[in-house]
Image: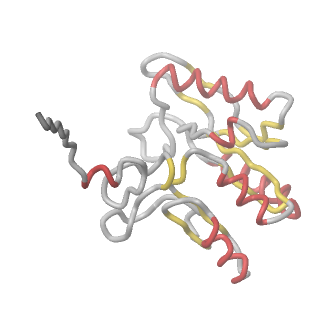
C-alpha cells in the first residue's frame, strides 16, 4: 500500500503512523491480543526482505523492517513503514504484506498522477475538508472503490453485494462489477464461419 501525504504534514503523519504501528501485537493469531499473525509462507518473507533491500539508498525505514523467523510456523514479520524519495516498484506493485510506503507530494495532482500510474485499481481514498479537492479526486482517481474521510481508513472495507465492489485496470477483470479486459467477452460466444461457394 502507498500513502500520499502533503509535504507540509508528512513528518507529523509518519510520526503518528509509526506510533500506531508500534502498538500492533504480532504473534499467535489464536490469541485475542494479536493484531497480526504470520505472512503466507517463506516466499512472502523473501519478498518482504527483497522489498526492504529496495528501500536502501532510495528512502528510509521508519518502523519495522525485520523478519522475525522463517519456517512453516514462523513466518512473522513486523509491520513496516517506509518513506521513499521517488516512485518505483514499491509504489507500483501490490505487495500483499504488512508494508506501507509513504510518499510526500507538493500537489494533489502530482499525488493522483503517481497513484494512477499502476497496473491495478481496487481502491483509493482521500482525507480532505476541501470540496473542490474532493471532487477532483473523485473525478480523476483510477480505482473502482473510492473513499473520502473514512474514519477507519482510506481504503478497503467495502460492502460487496450492497454496493459495487470492482477494481479498475488489472484488478477488475471479471465478476460482478468487473470492467476489466474480460468483462465484455463474458457476454459473447465464439463462432466460426466456413463458407464454400462451389
Residue 111 picture location, percent across and down: 75, 58
Residue extending furthest toward the front: 198
**Residue placed farthest to the left in the image?**
198
Q: Is 69 in front, or is 191?
A: 191
At which x and y percent is residue 169?
51, 50
Position of residue 82 relative to residue 149, above or below, is above
Q: Quadrant of residue 100?
A: top right
How is the structure coloured here?
A: secondary structure
Left/right placement of residue 76 relative to residue 128 reads: left
Residue occupying image coordinates x 62% and y 63%: 141
What residue lies at 71% left-to-right and 60% top-to-bottom? 112
Q: Image point 58% across, 21% down: which residue? A: 46
Q: Quadrant of the C terminus?
A: top left
Towards the viewer: 94 or 40:
94
Determine which quarter of the picture holds residue 131. bottom right
Q: Residue 126: x, y in percent?
A: 65, 67
Q: Nearer the viewer, residue 96 or 36?
A: 96
Please give the name of the residue rendered at 49% of the width and 31% of the height, measured from the top-left corner. 39
Does 145 sit above or below residue 21? below
Q: Is residue 196 left or right of residue 9?
A: left
> Which residue extends farthest top?
71
Q: How many marks?
A: 0
Amino acid at each position: 500500500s502507498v500513502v500520499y501525504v502533503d509535504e507540509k504534514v508528512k513528518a507529523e503523519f509518519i510520526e503518528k503512523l509509526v506510533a500506531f504501528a508500534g502498538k500492533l501485537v504480532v504473534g499467535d493469531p489464536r490469541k485475542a491480543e494479536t493484531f497480526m499473525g504470520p505472512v503466507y509462507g517463506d516466499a512472502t518473507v523473501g519478498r518482504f526482505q527483497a522489498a526492504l533491500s529496495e528501500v536502501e539508498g532510495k528512502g528510509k525505514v521508519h518502523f519495522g523492517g525485520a523478519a522475525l523467523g522463517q519456517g512453516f510456523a514462523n513466518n512473522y514479520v513486523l509491520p513496516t513503514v517506509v518513506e521513499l524519495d521517488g516512485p518505483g516498484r514499491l509504489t507500483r506493485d501490490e505487495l500483499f504484506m504488512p508494508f506501507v510506503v509513504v510518499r510526500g507530494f507538493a500537489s494533489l495532482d502530482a499525488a493522483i498522477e503517481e497513484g494512477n500510474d499502476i497496473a491495478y485499481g481496487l481502491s483509493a481514498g482521500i482525507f480532505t475538508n476541501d470540496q473542490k479537492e474532493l471532487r477532483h479526486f473523485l473525478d480523476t482517481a483510477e480505482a473502482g472503490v473510492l473513499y473520502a474521510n473514512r474514519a477507519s481508513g482510506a481504503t478497503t472495507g467495502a460492502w460487496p453485494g450492497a454496493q459495487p465492489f470492482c477494481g479498475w485496470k488489472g484488478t477488475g477483470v471479471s465478476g460482478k462489477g468487473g470492467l476489466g479486459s474480460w468483462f465484455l467477452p463474458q457476454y459473447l460466444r465464439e463462432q466460426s464461419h466456413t463458407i464454400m461457394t462451389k
